[in-house]
C-alpha cells in the first residue's frame, strides 16, 4: 500500500522527498556526484576552511545539494528540499547514513552523531539537512576557531 501511495504522490506532486532522489555516499568523489546529479551548477571555496571546496548540484526542481570536498573526497553533504516533509526526509538521512547503527542525540532536533562517532548529522533550518564525517567537521571547526583567535 505504501508503494502505491508513493507512486501516486510522485505522479501528482513530483519527487519532493529526499527518498525520491539518489543520495551520495560520504567518501565518494566529485565524479560520483556528477554521475548521480549531472554537472555542478557552482563551485566555490570554503571561506572558513580553504582546504575544502563546495560543489552545488540541482538534481530536480525540488532539490539542491551542496557537496563539500576535502582531500579529494566527499566529507559533507547538505540536502535542501523545497517541498520536503521534514520528518520523512530526516528519517531518510538517518537510514542512509546510519549504516544500521543508532544515532546519539547531541541537541534534540538539531544535531546527532552516529554511534560509532564517525558521522554527524545536523538540521538547523529545515528544509536543509546536512551530514558529514566527524573528522572533517572537527578539522573545519578547529580551523575556524584558530582563524577567529588570530589577530586581524
Image (cartoon, rainbow, N blue to C red):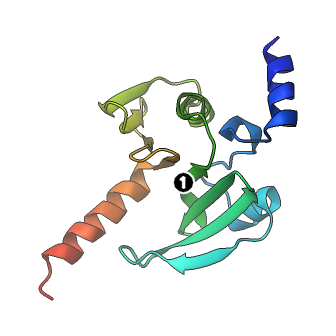
Which of the image's four quarters has the C terminus? bottom left
Determine the image quadrant of residue 141: bottom left
Q: Position of residue 106 (x, y in %)?
A: 30, 34
At 82% from the left edge and 10% from the top edge, which residue is drawn? 1
Q: In this rendering, is residue 69 above or below 64?
A: below
Please tell me how crowded label 1 is: few (under 14), some (14-19), or many (20+) other residues with Cα within 10 Å: some
Dividing the picture into quadrants, the one containing residue 123 is top left
Residue at (26, 64) in percent of width and height:
142
Reading the image, the residue beneath label 1 is: 78
Residue 64 point in image, percent of width and height? 64, 58
Q: Relative to 111, is 37 on the left or the right?
A: right
Q: Nearer the viewer, residue 94 or 21?
A: 21
Percent coordinates x, y for residue 42 in the rendering: 64, 76
Please determine whether, in this image, residue 57 is positioned above or below residue 120: below
Label 1: state its secondary structure. strand
**Residue located 63% across and 67% down the image:** 56
> From this viewpoint, which residue is outermost toward the top?
1
Q: Quadrant of residue 60?
A: bottom right
Of the pair 82 and 64, the residue shown nearer to us: 82
Residue drawn at (23%, 76%) of the image: 147
**Residue sitting farthest toward the bottom:** 152
**Is 1 left, or right, of 54 in this rendering?**
right
How many labels, in total? 1
Q: Is residue 81 left or right of residue 149?
A: right
- Point out residue 135 in the picture as x, y percentages from the top left corner: 40, 54
Amino acid at each position: 500500500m505504501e508503494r502505491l501511495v508513493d507512486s501516486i504522490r510522485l505522479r501528482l506532486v513530483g519527487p519532493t522527498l529526499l527518498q525520491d532522489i539518489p543520495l551520495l555516499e560520504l567518501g565518494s568523489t566529485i565524479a560520483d556526484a556528477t554521475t548521480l546529479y549531472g554537472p555542478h551548477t557552482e563551485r566555490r571555496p570554503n571561506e572558513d576552511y580553504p582546504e575544502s571546496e563546495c560543489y552545488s548540484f540541482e538534481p530536480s526542481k525540488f532539490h539542491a545539494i551542496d557537496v563539500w570536498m576535502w582531500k579529494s573526497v566527499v566529507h559533507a553533504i547538505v540536502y535542501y528540499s523545497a517541498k520536503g516533509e521534514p520528518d520523512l526526509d530526516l528519517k531518510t538521512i538517518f537510514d542512509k547514513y546510519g549504516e544500521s547503527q543508532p544515532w546519539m542525540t547531541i541537541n534534540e532536533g538539531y544535531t546527532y552523531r552516529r554511534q560509532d562517532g564517525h558521522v554527524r548529522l545536523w538540521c538547523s533550518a529545515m528544509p536543509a539537512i546536512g551530514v558529514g564525517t566527524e573528522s572533517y567537521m572537527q578539522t573545519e571547526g578547529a580551523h575556524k576557531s584558530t582563524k577567529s583567535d588570530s589577530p586581524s
